[in-house]
Image (cartoon, rainbow, N blue to C red):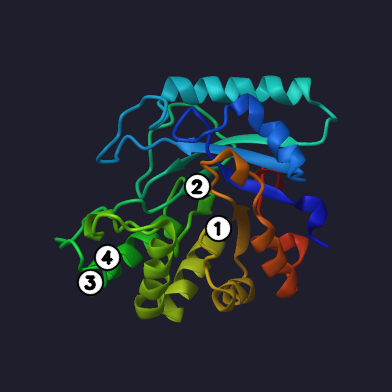
Amino acid sequence: MLEGARADCHVHSTWSDGEANPEEIPELARRSGLAAVAITDHYDPHAPDYRPVPGRFLDLPRLAAMIEWRDRVRTSQAGQGVRVWVGIERGPLPVPLEGATPDLVIASVHYLTEPPPTVRGRLFDEAYWRAYMQDVLRVASGPQVDVVGHMAGYLPMRSMLLPGSTFEERREIEREIARRFFIRDWYEQVFRAAAARGAACELHCPTKSPSPDMVRLGLDTGVRFSAGSDAHIASWIGDVGWAYDLLESLGARPADLWAPDFDR
């Protein structure tokens, strides 16, 4: 039921910290069976480590250039099967756009706006995760957001990690943090806040989050979901099967999916 609308709404390119050139991405998306793909490179001048260079973050001139490239691609690929969107992924605070018109804005809490002190190895600090939950709720309630990004995955715990952790170890730590601190009432508040302003919440495929029970809650609450691979590696582009399989299993309808063309 959802196959014809399959889109990957969260992909990174070499214009920020992705592996694939923008020119490669439409073809990679087509090979993955996508109907549409969104290039959402990092643009966040508020980030503590912001440096507007390729391999790190976009700046406004490169965002404008990306939008111009998008328009050329849409003209040249008319009728060739893959819709291309260009957006940005920002952090927890709105960013200056100065007239630029990205197709979508993913807002992800990559860092806390007012972080409490942290200690290496102290990963389950309740005060820290409560501050994180408040920032996510502010993002969902605030301006300049189309998608609330990875609310229960890729959590901002770098300052607390001990050296040497693996990708899978970090994902297991995140699952334990979610079990301990991310209560049902918080998810419901985020979903209701996003739904009230027409924003979606992301089904984040690399971390398989939120959990199926919370996605069911979101559907019951009336929020829409977008599917994202968060692909920094080229081979991950289009790896959104988990999200679509989950939505199918929960009886989701096409109207429960969000993508830019639904609203623009």
Q: Is residue 192 left or right of residue 36?
A: left
Local SS, label 3? loop
Q: Mark 3 or mark 4: which comes first in sequence?
A: 3
Quick one: label 2, few (<14), some, or many (20+) residues within 10 Å?
Answer: many
Instruction: Give the residue at x 46% y 45%.
Output: 144
Q: Please, what is the three-letter code of the amino acid marked with disc 2?
A: Ile
Residue 255 numbered mark, or none: none
Please say if 160 is above or below 173. Answer: above
Q: Could you tell me the amino acid type at mark 3?
A: Asp
- Alpha-carbon span between mark 1 and mark 3: 25 Å
Q: Give the residue at mark 2.
A: 106
- SS at mark 2 in the image: strand
Q: Residue at x 62, y 69 (%)?
A: 222
Q: Are marks 1 and 2 in contact (CB under 8 Å)?
A: yes
Residue labelled with disc 1: 202
- Residue type beneath disc 4: Ala
Q: Nearer the viewer, residue 115 or 96?
A: 115
Q: Residue at x 63, y 76 (%)?
A: 220
The mark lying in front, picked from 1 and 3, is 3
Does residue 167 appear left or right of residue 218 in this picture?
Answer: left
Question: In which image quadrant can residue 200 be found?
Answer: bottom right
Q: Position of residue 24 (x, y in %)?
A: 65, 28
Of badges 2 and 3, the one in the foreground is 3
Mark seen at residue 131? 4
- Amino acid type indicated by mark 1: Glu
Residue designated by label 3: 125
Residue 178 image offset from top left, x and y in percent:
40, 73
Quadrant for residue 60, please give it. top left
Q: Which comes before the other along the chain, label 1 or label 3?
A: 3
